[in-house]
Amino acid sequence: MHNLSFKRIGASLRDATRSLLPRRGTPSRRVGTQRLNAKVHRGVSLRTSALPLAFLCVLLLLLLPLPAWAGQTQPERTPLTLELLQERLRTPTLREGNLTVDLQKMAIDLRPENASFRDAFYQLLRKELGTKPLGLDLSYALILGDFVGSDLSLRTPLYAKAIAPIFTPTEQEKLERLRFVCLESLAIALPNSKDCRSLLGTESTPASEIAVFRGVLTLVQTRFNGEVKFSNTFFLQSVDAQGATFLQPTNWTETRFARPVSFTSVNFQQPSNFQGSIFFEKANFKKIKFRELADFQGSIFENTANFNQATFKQLAKFNSVQWQGNADFSEVYFANQAQFTKADFNQFLLLTEATFEQSVSFREAEFNQLVNLQGANILNQADFSDARFAKEACLSVPGLTFNSNQAKILGNPGQIGQMFCIPTLQGNQNVLRNLGQNFRQQQQVADANELEYTKQRLRLIEFGHRLTATNINSATVASLMNLGFSATQAQAIAQRRLLKSFRNSSELLTIADIDLKKYTQLSDRLIVGETLSIGGWLLQAWSWLALSVLLLLSGYGTNFWLVFGVGGLAIAYFGLLFWLVDRYRRLHPVPIIPTSYETISILVSFSVLEFFSLLAIFRNTAQPWLTLGCLFIIIVPVPMALLIRLYQQGRYHDLMDVSYFTEDGTFRQLRLLIGRLPVIPRNQTFRERYMPLLGDRHWNWLNYYDFSLNNLVKLGFNDIRLRDEHLPGIISALAWYQWSLGLIYITLVLWTLSRTIPGLNLLIYLK
């Protein structure tokens, strides 16, 4: 109709334009010409401007596309009468194996002024749909007035003994399943549900009844001009409402869907209420538009819920929702607040490329699997406070768009930082930096440090990959074949890089001989870049080694208790070694050995210190055995080699009965001994001040721990050093070795403290 009207307009304009053109042989045209000649200046100007303008208007109207409202063709709807309704009820159509009442493309007037038809409409349909498992097809129909869908259903209680015998065994089984789910969720998500709460009673009451819709409900492209009410309704078959339009509020409160439901591309112009609903099978809300409030509070999705590409213009409530299957919110646009408080996600939550314009709340939510935020846009605030994450769950945030100066991510201090997982550092450095800055602004130093640890761990993986992976820009054909490529594929790679070097490994897929399977199999063992020289490779290896040590021994300066455990282990170990070389000297010819009391004391104290140090290490690192292995390599080989050599050559020198260790006898106090060296100077006054340790004291074994503490941490109760005369060089080398390690360790301690305690770095730098 609209196309015809536009054609008529175009034809009229063309006729009007032709009337302006000259026509030979007509008297009227000759008269017009004479008049124009008489008024040449004004006439010529008028004609030369009017003709192009008319042609331009015609061309625009003919060539421009029609507007959207003109291109849409509205279906021709037939007004539904009682006679036509009765005829359709008597002759249902068979569709996909189900008998269906066909009311497609009908205009159904259910407004109050048409009350007699409305009452008869509900009465006739309820009688047929309740006694027979008939479907109802309202596709492309126009519903005027409120549509109370629950009045088309058969009401029945949920008690097994009270269920109407008219239901088939399959239908009764579905009702029993609903009863089972209700009993499970009474204390979790649906404490206020009418049909679920009624199960706590002992007998059936009208309040415990539920409306049962037995057949398939089809609402494809249906337009509802009034309110739609399906509250407390149980659909035993599928519901298909693709492309439907709801201009007024819709009420699906406590509705149960036993079969798959599709609301694809549905347009809700007013608030829609799905509160307390149960979806037993897949629920498809793809490309749906909620222009007002969308309320799904307390609902249960027993299967996959697909909200892909949906749009929520106003508040979206998903509080206390149970998601038994995957929850897909990929590419969803939340223009207003989104609430997922106390939601339970048993499977994956997919928020890939979702956009949150306003705040989103996951407070007290429970995540049992991965939360995929890849490419998501958080423009305001995301709250994960008091959320619980299972062991397998994490927040996957590669490519996350998040500006810490404008938005915030909230979570429990000391916990939320551990929940982020990023597979690679490439392309995600900005994400990690923004997340770290976000938690530092909130004074959540532990979470910011956890993200820094994640960043450095990914960098370590990159270093290792560069050292061990094969560079496809420089590898020989034989190396490529040893890697796993066939001879043909290796030759194709060699020929391709002669023309142009590879910029990334994915360019291998442009080679016809290499398929996706082979690329996926070998991509982790490939690298693209400049070939490293021997010196460059060694520098890269040194960077990898240094970063490995920092990560294993301190979590890259982010874990003080890990550093404390490492230091305690080293202090106890060296204290035991110093006690051994000083108190256990020889057996022949005259034994110089410690007493049994001192031996038991040192061994017990060593065990206690080692236990607490190991406890600190195992509780504060994900790789405790690697940490212990790294520490073992640093503190065991060199001291043990010196110790073995010492006992091999024996000790035969002066002052054999005097301790190698001396202490400052002028005063006792807790001292910070940063500049102290492990051996006293060769000066008589120092020899008078520093007196040998007394071996006949029961507490003498504590002095060796004090010396080890002085050497490693530069802090001690007494200034204990080695004597300067008649001292075996091996013992001096052992003390100097620990003292050298102490310089590195105290630097590591101060660096870690500055990163873990806010403001302490200023104190350290000022001193």
Image (spheres, helix red, strand yellow):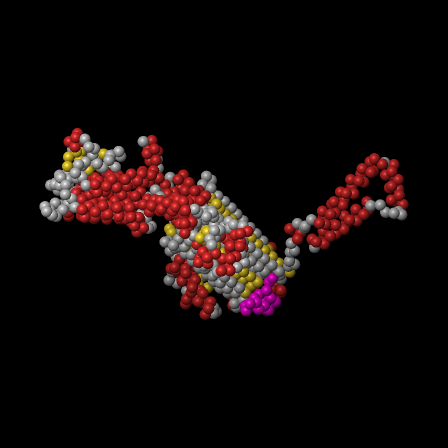
Nearest the camera: 244 or 409? 409
Direction top: furthest residue: 685
Q: Is residue 132 left or right of residue 25?
A: left
Tally of marks: 0
Residue appearing at x 43%, y 42% in the figure: 433
Front residue of 194/324: it is 324
The residue range painted magenta reads 87-104
* Camera-side residue of 197 and 16: 16
Residue lying at 52% horizontally and 67% vertically, measured from the top left: 133
Whether residue 28 sits left or right of residue 498 in the image: it is right
Report x, y in % for residue 603. 18, 48
Is 435 included in the stretch rendered in magenta? no
For the C terminus, which image quadrant? top left
Residue 100 in picture, x, y percent from top left: 56, 66
- Which residue is pictured at 48% across the width and 43% down the height? 379
User: Residue at point 56% right, 63% down?
Assistant: 136
Nearest to the observer: residue 346 or residue 297: 346
Please provide percent x and percent y for residue 83.
Answer: 62, 65
Height in image: 183 above or below 50?
below
Residue 253 in view (yes/no):
no
Judged left or right of residue 239, residue 693 is left
Residue farthest left in this picture: 590
Q: Is residue 88 magenta?
A: yes
Instruction: Measuring from the top left, give residue 215's x and y in whole percent.
Output: 52, 65
Q: Do we see residue 14 in this rendering?
A: yes
